């Protein structure tokens, strides 16, 4: 005979199921007490008991004056810090043709593109942008000759400075330089602070675009170990700086590519102070900063910068449009150098994306849009994580990003992700193998999978990918 | 008693006056025989006699199957080749703040901007572009993510390859890389062919943007003398290549900035062969190539390139829109290197200007537009030349460009053009002083004046500039 389960426990079980299915992803707010009571026709005290039960189970947490939120939880399959340290000898950067090949595969429209860090096109505000473009064209606004403004138009620099003020920065519009995407911002920051042959400390793993830039600029890399939750290891960095003539440090403080790690604000403060003391510039890449899953936007290292030593780089490629190629750079005390370089190498940025995004930012709706896509990416990440847990073999470990849409996954039993890449391409699936995120080709048993490409349609592709991993594992055991 | 002047002589005098007033600028076609006969109610034989008279006077010339054209004539005030050779020792490039200051002055809308090489905004097809932008936005064409195509969209690369075929080139669309203006094309070409510290042979005087790029890329310059009509001295170049480890040569073959010179096609052929033999790449800047005043478009060195040794750079900044920041590069055998660099440093070019200009090029009207603006610039150049002759002191010498809209002017009695610059700025006029066109600050008694800024409105500004030159000359004589 079944024991009668109390009402609050039954509701708690239902809610927990929904949370585990990704309806309420980690970091998201669950409905308020009164709202749940009304929706489910239960008393307020029953709902309260249910929420408290889930709280004691560590599934949700109450936040004062705000409500109840789904907690970020370590689980059995969560990736832990790699015991093997990153390489700490300077490395020349030579990107082989593989990265270019990977890039070309991701252009094929028939592929399931888990290998590309592209945003979901369905989550871009294209209809709105198209209307704005039409408006501006009718007004003749695009007749402006932006080649006279290497730093970009004021119309765009003002809302950028305003938003940055909102997350703790205090630079003015005149201290911003508009760029062709975050890529150009990073390249300008490196050119302004380094000379050819210089050594740059990078995260390991790091976004492989950084490696392409370092190679193009004849710079050397020093790989610093990272933690999948907190990013760059400050201890390792400090040690490295004592032993190597590092000219600049480059880091993705929020939701790094590929780790998804978020450096705690306290660490950011320590990092800024450390580098100011040593007079080594910090190039901060905050391209995913707006795509947080938690309650509030994490800060940036730049917010703690009192000496102009931080060069903050970002873009609108992840949340507005990658095709517009529009980014920006707040270069601190390298402002004049960056302006001069921007003039030398590009004579300013195209008038069309500049004015379109300027109007988009100032005409209302951007914050609403961001709230929408943050929820959507949190759900995609939660669902893809669950699907990997389901379809990949035991021993797979998955990082738990707190923002962005990238999943850094360790394959079981040291499966070589380059082998997986080749097998996956045959099945019209791309992945990003771990070794491309390191100039010394470490991280061979990792892959980066993008939840930007996740949908109900691609779920079966992920299941197929899982079967390939199972097969490689079985073949490995046989051999 | 006045001698009776024959009818044909009177008409010839009238026509000559119109030619000298700039109604029919140098290189332009004058009305056909029949057309003139009808317009002026004279017999065909009278008109023929008039034209023959002007032909014998060296003012016009007959071209078979085409008609009569105003000849390019050396005049008393025409600039001749500089007897002093250009510097032939390698020079480190350090652009001082002056160039940046000049650049800022030219941003001031109240200034008469003879110092900027900007096209006349009234001669850009902005209304047409605005309509195309609106169309493409409505079609959703801008939703394309061009970050996947570092080389640019095929829609634009195809019409570029087609037009280049029309002036003698035989590269396909797949051998073109779209860039952010000609500036980025030049920077990519230099990065692909040179390493930091390498020596690049440049024209002297040369476009000062080249010097900014060389400085940014840590390259050294070797100045090669030029001729105001034929451009780069091949003899001097050959000599320099025997004596210095030149890694690349960079030249504006057609209507160079600032000289306005046009290298004869035979010289282009010799140049290409010379550099192929020595295995030194030629970076060719053809940004003004379409703005010819003569009967047909001059060829490019790239047209004689059998080995992929020429990297041809151009843009749409002079004839379509400078604010769109759209250029291109046909990098010959450096194609893969350039593609990789473009991906590393910019991740492709903005979708908006790419698709807009692609449609503009393919939807008819571009050739008509070019014919219109060629005539307009030929007139501006002729009128500004005449105004300089009128308002500037004796001893002023003016180059005779056969295309583009830039005038390279030697001031009399060694007046320092930097002094003239400072005086002119006080009168809200900008000029480009000659020394900024040389890394060793030669050409101090030259100025570059842009007929792009010439109009009936700015004629009085040029007269004021002339009075300043007169004053400086008088002060110089007193001192």
Image: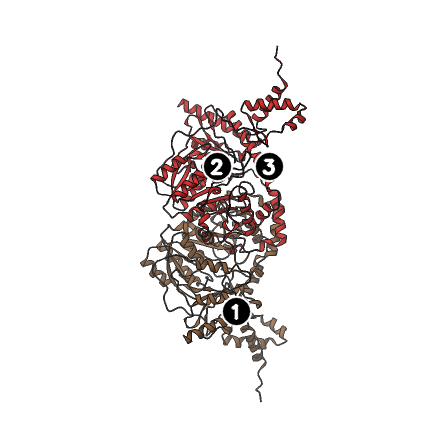
Chain colours: A red, B brown
Q: Which mark is residue B462?
A: 1
Give the residue at mark 2. Answer: A265
B53 to the left or right of B474 = right
Comes first in the chain, label 3 or label 2? 2
Query: Does the image show residue A448?
Result: yes
Instruction: Locate the C terminus of chain B by quadrant.
Output: bottom left
Residue contact at pointers 3 and 2, CB within 8 angstroms: no
A318 to the left or right of B247 = right
Residue contact at pointers 1 and 3, CB within 8 angstroms: no
Tags 1 and 3 both on a single chain: no
Q: CA gap, disc 1 to disc 3?
A: 58 Å
Element assignment for label 1: helix
Element assignment for label 2: helix
Can you give x and y, in whole percent of width and height, for residue B254 in the image? 46, 61
**Outermost residue to the bottom:** B1
Give the residue at mark 3. Answer: A372
Q: Is residue B140 above or below residue B221?
A: above
Which of the two marks, 1 or 2, is nearer to us in this view? 2
A205 to the left or right of A166 = left
Q: Is residue A438 above or below residue B54?
A: above
Query: Chain for mark 3?
Result: A
* In front of the other: A257 or B251: A257
Instruction: Locate the N terminus of chain B by quadrant.
Output: bottom right
* In front of the other: B129 or B472: B472
Quarter assignment of residue A70: top right
Can you give x and y, in whole percent of width and height, for residue A400 in the image? 49, 30
Q: CA gap, disc 1 to disc 2?
A: 59 Å
């Amino acid at each position: 005979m079944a024991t009668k389960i109390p009402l609050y426990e039954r509701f708690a079980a239902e809610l927990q199921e929904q949370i585990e299915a990704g309806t309420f992803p980690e970091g998201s707010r669950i409905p308020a007490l009164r709202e749940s009571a009304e929706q489910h026709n239960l008393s307020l005290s029953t709902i309260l008991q249910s929420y408290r039960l889930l709280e004691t189970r560590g599934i949700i947490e109450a936040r004062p004056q705000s409500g109840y939120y789904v907690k970020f939880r370590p689980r059995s399959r969560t990736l832990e810090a790699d015991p093997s340290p990153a390489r700490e000898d300077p490395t020349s950067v030579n990107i082989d043709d593989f990265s270019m090949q990977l890039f070309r595969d991701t252009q094929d429209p028939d592929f399931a593109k888990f290998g590309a860090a592209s945003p979901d096109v369905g989550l871009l505000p294209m209809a709105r942008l198209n209307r704005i473009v039409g408006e501006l064209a009718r007004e003749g606004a695009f007749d402006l000759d932006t080649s006279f403004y290497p730093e970009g138009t004021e119309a765009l620099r003002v809302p950028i400075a305003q938003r940055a003020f909102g997350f703790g920065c205090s630079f003015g519009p005149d201290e911003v330089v508009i760029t062709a995407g975050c890529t150009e911002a990073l390249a300008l920051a490196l050119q302004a602070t380094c000379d050819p042959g210089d050594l740059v400390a990078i995260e390991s793993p790091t976004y492989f675009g950084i490696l392409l830039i370092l190679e193009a600029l004849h710079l050397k890399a020093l790989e610093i170990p990272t933690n999948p939750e907190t990013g760059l290891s400050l201890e390792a960095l400090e040690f490295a700086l004592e032993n190597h003539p590092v000219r600049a440090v480059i880091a993705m403080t929020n939701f790094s590519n590929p780790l998804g790690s978020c450096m705690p604000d306290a660490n950011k403060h320590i990092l800024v102070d450390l580098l100011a003391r040593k007079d080594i510039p910090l190039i901060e890449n905050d391209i995913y900063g707006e795509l947080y899953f938690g309650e509030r936007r994490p800060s940036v290292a730049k917010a703690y910068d009192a000496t102009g030593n931080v060069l903050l780089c970002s873009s609108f490629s992840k949340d507005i449009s990658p095709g517009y190629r529009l980014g920006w750079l707040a270069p601190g005390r390298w402002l004049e150098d960056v302006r001069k370089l921007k003039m030398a190498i590009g004579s300013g940025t195209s008038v069309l994306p500049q004015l379109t995004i300027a109007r988009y930012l100032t005409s209302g709706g951007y914050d609403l849009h961001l709230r929408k896509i943050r929820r959507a990416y949190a759900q995609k990440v939660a669902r893809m994580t669950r699907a990997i847990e389901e379809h990949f073999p035991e021993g797979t470990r998955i990082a738990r990003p707190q923002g962005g849409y990238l999943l850094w996954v360790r394959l079981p039993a040291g499966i070589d992700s380059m082998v997986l890449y080749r097998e996956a391409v045959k099945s019209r699936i791309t992945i990003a193998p771990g070794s491309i995120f390191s100039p010394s080709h470490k991280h061979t048993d990792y892959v980066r999978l993008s939840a930007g490409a996740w949908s109900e349609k691609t779920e079966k592709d992920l299941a197929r990918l899982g079967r390939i991993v199972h097969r490689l594992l079985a073949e490995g055991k046989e051999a």
